Amino acid sequence: MIKASIALALIGLGVLVASLSGAAAVPFYLPLSTLALAGIVFVGRDIPKFLRIFVVMLSATHLVLVALVLGAAAGVITGDYTGYVPPPSAALGATGFGAIIYGLSYVPVVRTICRITDLYLASQADSVIRIPFIGLVRAREGVIGTWMIGILIAINLAQVALNVRLSFFSRDMFNALEAKDAAAFWYQLFVIFTPLAAVFVAIALTEVLLQNVLTIRWRAFLNTYYLREWLGDGTHYRMQIMGRGADNPDQRISEDLRKFVESTYSLSVGLMNQAATLVSFVAILWTISAGFTFPGTSVEIPGLLVWVCAGYAILGTWVTHLIGRPLIALNFEQERVEANYRFSLARLREYAEQVALLSGESAEREGLGRRFGQIVDNYMRIVFRLIKLNTFTSAYFQANVVVPYILTAPYYFVGKISLGQMQQVVGAFSRVESALTYFITIYTTLADYKAVLDRLTTFEGAIASAQRVGGDSKLAITPKVGRELHLEDLDVRLPDGSALLHTDELDFRPGERTLMTGPSGSGKSTLFRAIAGIWPFGEGQIQVPEGQSMMLLPQRPYIPIGTLRDAVTYPSKVDAYTDSEMAEALRIAKLPQIADRLDEERNWGQTLSLGEQQRLAVARALLAKPDWLFLDEATAALDEPTEAEIYRIIREKLPNTTVVSIGHRSTLAAYHDRRIDMKKTEGGLSTPVDLRQAEPAE
């Protein structure tokens, strides 16, 4: 940015010297605008990268405009090509918009948007992209995204320039029709219009391709980033147990990221396109209406049509904002209730058997009906608000068709403008009014975009809060030399800070099978989660054997949707074990009926009973062969003979694995060497008490 600002400053000084010396007949404001833009580029070197791309592209556009103006002034550009030279005032537009971008960089909501976009643009990940006629090009993903945004900005600015030239084509063609000049008409049609149209179509197709490639790459990066933040180090679990922050994280990652990427691109580039359009066509309106007098008077008002158009657009924008402002909150609420209803349906599908066994269909219909009623109620509030908004905007845009004719017809009838100029004014008025009312056009999109941004920022806030809780945890888990698992001065608390359990010292010895018992809610499962490192609330020392692996099997195992091979190897990769090893593990775990269905893909969590799911989890342990195996009521759904067989299998097939179990059945004591019971102290805390040493089970 510093080099670019120096280059702009030198060019501006050169043009200023040439202008003062008479070497170039250009307005004084042209070199001054170049110097001003150089200053903006210099002070803007620290603004977000997303905004810097726009400033750099505007600087490049400004230099092209300066070169064209200088070329026309020096006589290098002559003849029909002078129609492609923009007015010198167009250079002011690039400088002005650069200043606006710099100012926007200090608006909090814009900085929030740019912080998320810059995650992608600053990416250092190696990537490749296929470029037509060149092939695969390797570069950092952030560099690829930066170049694609820059090219798309250039395409949009080129489209504005083509539209300006086409307005002059329209003027000349209608003038030819008015004069019945056939030669001029066909010249305009084939020599001027056809090449312009061909270029317009070509760059429009290029824009469609680049935009879609950019948005999917951008979304893919953010999807990976947020998944990593959400799933990293148990953050997703801490967010859930903390019970605050972001609901429906699935929606925020799948839907909100897609909407954020698409809307950020369309709104930012669209705003720049409309700003460039505004500057370009305001110059046309100002020039044509330079000598217009106020209707019914002899008072001459410079640029009369510009002021009328601006007032008309500002009035429409103000009224639209007053009517449409409540849509932001309503759209946010709609996304929330839709996500809640969708989650309820998914949860019902997951627990279909339990609902059927309890004959809970009526209660489910009532609950789902209530949630869908919330969708309908909020949706109708949106509909009534949109009816009010669309009533005004429809009337407003219908008036746009005739307003420019009403304004220009008197001047045409008195001969101040030609038919071609009238048509050019109508087109320019429409373009300027459209640019000024861009806010009206995108209001509902903007409302939805703000709601999307709010959901993403609250999601980020919840992730940050969960990460902070994990980072600030005083439950220190440290590796230790030896094979014992040692707890010292351990206090485990609930998320609200209330104490749950305490132990001065507790050891789990290698090779010893330990059973933990006690009343529900005494902290047995929570202690397991603290040892596993996912429970952050509390303080004390948890010293785990260095270099040894641990595996925890909960009462209800997680079974991913996919093939049985995916389910039995989870969380390892499917190629970590051979098919024969997987099939053998399933047979040993008393699941011979599915051992030959490894490639079958289905929702195994719904296909298998809870008892079968628990045996599948045991098969995972048989494959993984962990040094420590924690069973949190992991056989509670099995009958006692099968449970006894499973414990016998674990002892036989995993002789080097230390087993620690949680259970309530009295029969479990026979399969363990030691029993620890959670007892309530006088203060209401639970504390582990070593009750007895049991005889080893046969």
Image (cartoon, grey):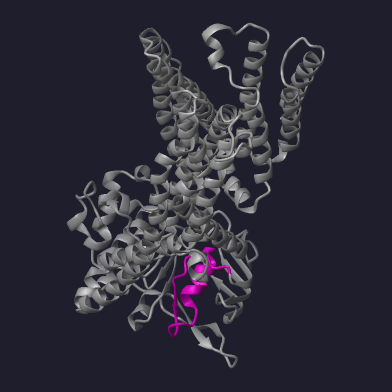
Q: Is residue 144 left or right of residue 380?
A: right
Using the rendered view, name the quadrant where residue 613 is placed: bottom left
Could you tell me which quadrant the N terminus lies in? top right
Q: Can residue 535 be found in the magenta stretch?
A: yes
Task: Say whether residue 562 is visible.
Answer: yes
Residues in magenta?
A: 511-536
Q: Is residue 40 left or right of residue 622?
A: right
At x 25%, y 58%, the residue is 604
Say which of 19 and 213 sits in front: 19
Could you tell me which quadrant the C terminus lies in? bottom left
- Total labels: the figure holds 0
The spot of residue 418 in percent (x, y) is 47, 23
Using the rendered view, name the quadrant where residue 353 is placed: bottom left
The spot of residue 590 in percent (x, y) is 23, 62
Q: Can residue 346 be found in the magenta stretch?
A: no
164 versus 689 height, above or below? above
The spot of residue 55 in percent (x, y) is 64, 33
626 versus 63 height, above or below? below
Residue furthest to the bottom in view is: 682
Q: Is residue 512 left or right of residue 33?
A: left
Task: Say whether residue 590 is visible.
Answer: no
At x 41%, y 45%, the residue is 399
At x 60%, y 45%, the residue is 114
The spot of residue 59 in percent (x, y) is 65, 27
Say which of 488 and 246 sits in front: 246
